[in-house]
Image (tube, helix red, strand yellow):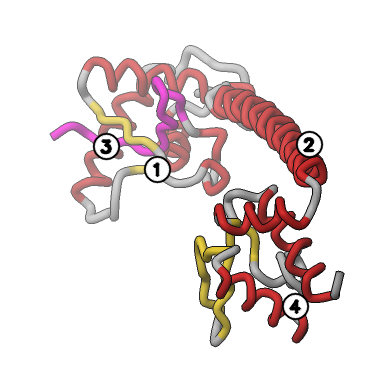
Amino acid sequence: MDKATQLVLDALGRAAAEPAGVPLYGGRTAAGLFPATLPGKQAAQRCLEQGYLRVVRSESRGKLVHEACALTEKGLAYLLTQVSPRQVLEDFVRALEARRSQVDELVAAARQTQATLDALKGAVQKVLAQLSSPAAAPALPAPAVNGAETWKASVLSFLAQWQTGGASGDCPLPELFRHARQTAPALTIGQFHDGLRSWHDQGPIYLHPWTGPLYDLPEPAYALLAGHEIVYYASLRT
């Protein structure tokens, strides 16, 4: 058997095992039906002209066009007249085993990805819980009875001044908390958050969520978890 015929038969055998199509010529990263040499190109042209192969897709890369080809009925008939059907069947079996190995790898990768997503979800829930926990705040003095209620009136007054004084946007909770502690130095983050929640439910104020990425929170200890949202701003109802 001459070299050109051998190139043709090898290519038709590979194409028979890859019904979806194979690149006509091999490259640096992918195998093809024919080598990108002069004899390989001549053999490829012969198969296309004889109708042994058909182009199933093409892709332009710069000035070059890369084609993928599949075996035709005529090409299969020619192949079976030149080689043993047993050899063609063995090529099919090898291709099936290779595909099974690839599927197993994909399934394993999908399971690993799912496990990673589950772990990330659990981590996010822990971070959200930590953000809303009073333990995440800086250490503060023990709460005192003196001034425990007066800070609320001070905060409402501060919000009114914030909104009428030309401030841009709603008031950040860290800013509001620092003002509240000027009136009640023993005020804790937990007491502050409880007061904001009761006000939000009863009507005096609105609580607004943080809409950016969590890692951009400037002072996360003061953020408040309300339902499924991370609250970081407050404003008076008007």
Answer left or right for 10 relative to 199.
Answer: right
Give the mark, 4 or 3, whose residue is nearer the N terminus: 4
Q: Residue 40 carries which label?
A: 4
Q: Using the numbered discs, state the Cα–Cα distance from disc 2 to disc 1 in whole angstroms.
A: 50 Å
**Residue nearest the viewer, comparing 106 with 73:** 73
Give the mark, 2 or 1, whose residue is nearer the N terminus: 2
> Magenta segment: does it hold 152?
no
Percent position of residue 42, x then y: 69, 82
**Quick check: 208 above or below 146?**
below
User: Badges 3 and 1: C-beta atoms under 8 Å apart?
Assistant: no
The span shown in magenta is 224-238
Residue depicted at x 73% and y 63%: 11
What secondary structure is found at the residue carrying circle 3?
strand
Q: Quickly name the residue at label 1.
A: 211
Of the residues tagged 4 and 1, which is closer to the observer? 4
Q: Quickly name the residue at label 3.
A: 235
Of the residues tagged 2 and 3, which is closer to the observer? 2
* Residue type, mark 3 in image: Ser
Q: Quickly name the residue at label 2.
A: 97
Residue depicted at x 19% and y 48%: 164
Mark 4: few, some, or many residues within 10 Å (few <14, many ≥20)?
many
Answer left or right for 103 relative to 234.
Answer: right
Mark 1: few, some, or many residues within 10 Å (few <14, many ≥20)?
few
Find the residue positioned furthest to the left. Answer: 238
Q: Which mark is residue 85?
A: none
